Amino acid sequence: MKKFNILLISIFTALSAMADGQIRWLETKADFGAFDEDTGAVSTVFRFVNDTNEPVAIIAANASCGCTAPIYSREPVAVGDTAKIEVRYDPAGRPGRFEKFVSVRTSADDTKTKLIVRGVVVGSESSVGARYPVAVGPISLKRGAVMLGKIKSGHAKMEFLDGYNRAHDSISPTVEGLPKYLEVTTVPRRVAPGEQVQFNFYFRADRCPQWGIVTDSVTIIPDPAASDRIVLPVVAIIEEDFSRLTPGQMKNAPEAALDTDRVILDAEGKGSIHLTNRGKDPLKIRRIYTQDAGLEVDTKSDSVKKGKSAEITVTATPEALAKGINARATIITNDPSNPTITFRIVAEPK
């Protein structure tokens, strides 16, 4: 008899649960895929079936941000009927991947149901252009050059350049024409529509043969299938690392000094300046250069002994001389106190 009563109670409990029922969501996630920002707001509809034994109403629906808006009716839904809630997403000013949610609470249950919308916004020309002004085919870059700044000799430095895929297809950017001292990786290797890409530039000064300003360039190919190319300047300044010099070495270090701060070219476009070593150890001339076209600076010496001087010659082309010259030249040495010295080069127009 006791076992029979337990069986009846179990059956009654099961029937009661079936009678009470619950709401049944037909979907809780929606993916808009990739779409243009200029398309405007996009929306989708989520539905649930009222499997309870009484009318059910949506009490509240709260979005995770202001760009996402739930639209619904508060009217009760009859038993067996289907309720709808529209979720709208506004992509204006929001290029890139997104995932937003709406928390829904009904009169049938105190717990909340999370509805998720996701997708990728392919930015408009104005929106993308403000963040990534350098456009090359399907890709836009944040800057048109990579400036690494100062790097100590024997050291390395990394600089990042952000890009954006404004196409509707995935792309696989590559970088060509790398000098031996520069390495570049792209993350990710394959970039989905509306997604960002990062170019990681790794400059190894121990592999660079130059001192001072080093200007080179690389070529970014947005995708093997694209014909577009961009030549990207890469600039760094290589400085000697004097941090390991002992007090004794600093005391005996070379000291560079010029006999004047300018070279006035003669009628033939020639002139000279003298570099003197006022220190004790030999003064090593790392590099002499000017970035002005039509000028050449040079010396026959790459090392200057204590108390001695080296002549630095300056020669201008006739074309540069005819226009007049007001330029600067740079001397880089192993003087730890003053490793970089500049002087002016001037000439009246002919």
Image (cartoon, grey):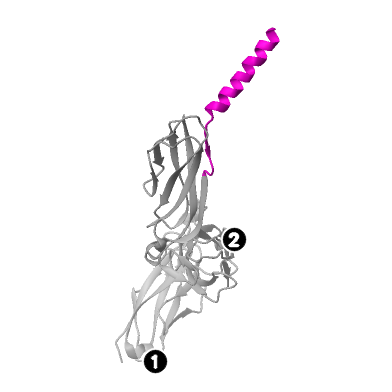
Q: Which residue is drawn at 42% across and 76% down?
A: 291
| Quadrant containing the C terminus in the rendered view | bottom left
Badge 1 amino acid: Pro
Badge 1: few (under 14), some or many (20 or more) residues near its Cα, within 10 Å? some
Q: Does the magenta stretch include residue 17?
A: yes
Q: Distance between the residues labelled 2 and 1?
A: 50 Å
Q: Residue at x 61, y 23 (%)?
A: 14
Q: Is the magenta stretch mostly helix, strand or loop?
A: helix
**What residue is pinned by disc 2?**
189
| Quadrant containing the N terminus in the rendered view | top right
Spot the residue most to the top.
1
Provide residue 37's location: percent of width, then percent of height: 42, 61
**What residue is pinned by disc 1?**
318
Q: In terms of secondary structure, where does tag 1 sit? A: helix
Q: Which sits in the foreground, 290 or 341?
A: 290
Which of the 4 image quarters holds residue 329?
bottom left
Q: Residue at x 52, y 34 (%)?
A: 51
Q: Residue 105 carries which label?
A: none
Which of the 4 image quarters holds residue 58?
top left
Q: Give the range drawn in magenta.
A: 1-28
Provide residue 318's location: percent of width, then percent of height: 39, 92
Q: In terms of secondary structure, where does tag 2 sit? A: loop
Badge 2 amino acid: Arg
Residue 117 visible (yes or no): yes
Spot the residue most to the left.
348
Q: Which sits in the foreground, 68 or 127?
A: 68
Q: Do the CB atoms of the residues marked 2 and 1 lie less than 8 Å apart?
A: no
Which of the two discs, 2 and 1, labels the residue nearer the N terminus? 2
Badge 2: few (under 14), some or many (20 or more) residues near its Cα, within 10 Å? some
Q: Is residue 67 above or below residue 198?
A: above
Q: Is residue 39 above or below residue 6?
A: below
Q: Which sits in the foreground, 199 or 130?
A: 130
